Amino acid sequence: MYLRRRTREALTGWATVLPALVVQVIFIYLPLVWAFYVSFFSWNMIRPMRYVGFQNYERLFSSADFWNSMSVTGIYILGTVIPSVIIGLLLAALLNIEWIKGRGIFRTLFYIPVITSMAAAAVIWGWLYEPNFGLINYFLSFFGIKNIKWLSDPNYSLLALIIVGVWKRIGYNMVLFLAGLQTIPKSYYEAAEIDGATAWSKFRRITLPLLSPTTLFVFIMQFIASFRVFVSVSVMTSGGPAKSTQVITYYLYENAFRYLKFGYASAIAVVMFAMMIILTLLQFRLSKRRVHYQ
């Protein structure tokens, strides 16, 4: 009887997770295996596949365009992850204060960019960045700054994309930090006030340590999102000007779907996957002593 019940429970559990497992296998694991396999071939989807061994990887690591795309991606990650996490945390701390009126309205307003289509948002930001009639240059003209070519000047194009990326992700980070803040017992703050702690001391000694698991999760999620940025680059700059916004994902896209170098593009995908795994594990390793789960 006991074995039957255990068997029934096991079958029920497998039946519950099976649909999600099938979807993961079909759309995640099989494409990963296929990409790794194709990376050892020269293939343009027209002619038969030709085995080339590690030539795609050798060419990749000796390519100036690849290293340029990696440096652009690194700058984009630093420029979006750190500001979006810090601003999201500060907004969450402010909107967690009970005496602030209209907190629900502000939370909604800050979260709207998260649910906005990136393609639509990129088009709107393209209008805002328009050098002659855009609202951003119009506003800057009051400070004596005129006609910045945000999307056609290599000195400003990546900065323009970083601003859009930060705007897009602040609300997501804010909601996560709000959830983390509301799990911290108020008794800790009350005890600190009795001891004469200042607002900064409470934030540094109570809020930040107890919020460290949430902070680690937010950093990892934002790192992955920034590493995979594509839509804003495709819509707003197409990797230009002068490859100043050619992030690694757009470099992969160009080689796969513009130049039909699917073996080479697969090698890029494999390297991207390996780097994401290594850097994520490195974040866990570096934050091990600073994250408090209890």
Image (cartoon, grey):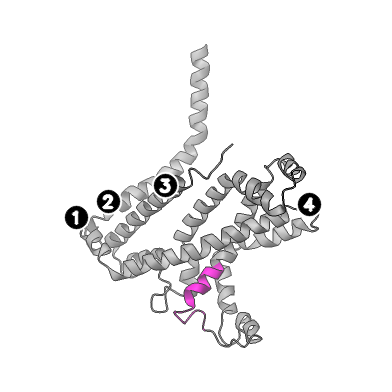
Quick one: 64 or 260, which is closer to the camera? 64
Q: Position of residue 152 (x, y in %)?
A: 47, 82
Q: Earlier in the sequence, mark 4 or mark 1?
A: 1
What amino acid does circle 2 point to? Answer: Tyr
What amino acid does circle 1 point to? Answer: Gly
Q: Earlier in the sequence, mark 3 or mark 4?
A: 4
Q: Earlier in the sequence, mark 3 or mark 2?
A: 2
Q: Which element carries disc 2, helix, strand or loop?
A: helix
Q: Which residue is mark 3?
A: 281
What amino acid does circle 3 point to? Answer: Leu
Q: Which label lies toward us, 4 or 1?
A: 4
**156 magenta-colored:** yes
Q: Which label lies toward us, 3 or 2?
A: 3
Q: How many angstroms separate mark 3 from mark 2 (CA)?
A: 25 Å
Q: Position of residue 70 (x, y in %)?
A: 37, 65
Q: Position of residue 239 (x, y in %)?
A: 42, 73
- Residue 87 is left or right of residue 79, and the answer is right
- Residue 121 is left or right of residue 245, and the answer is right
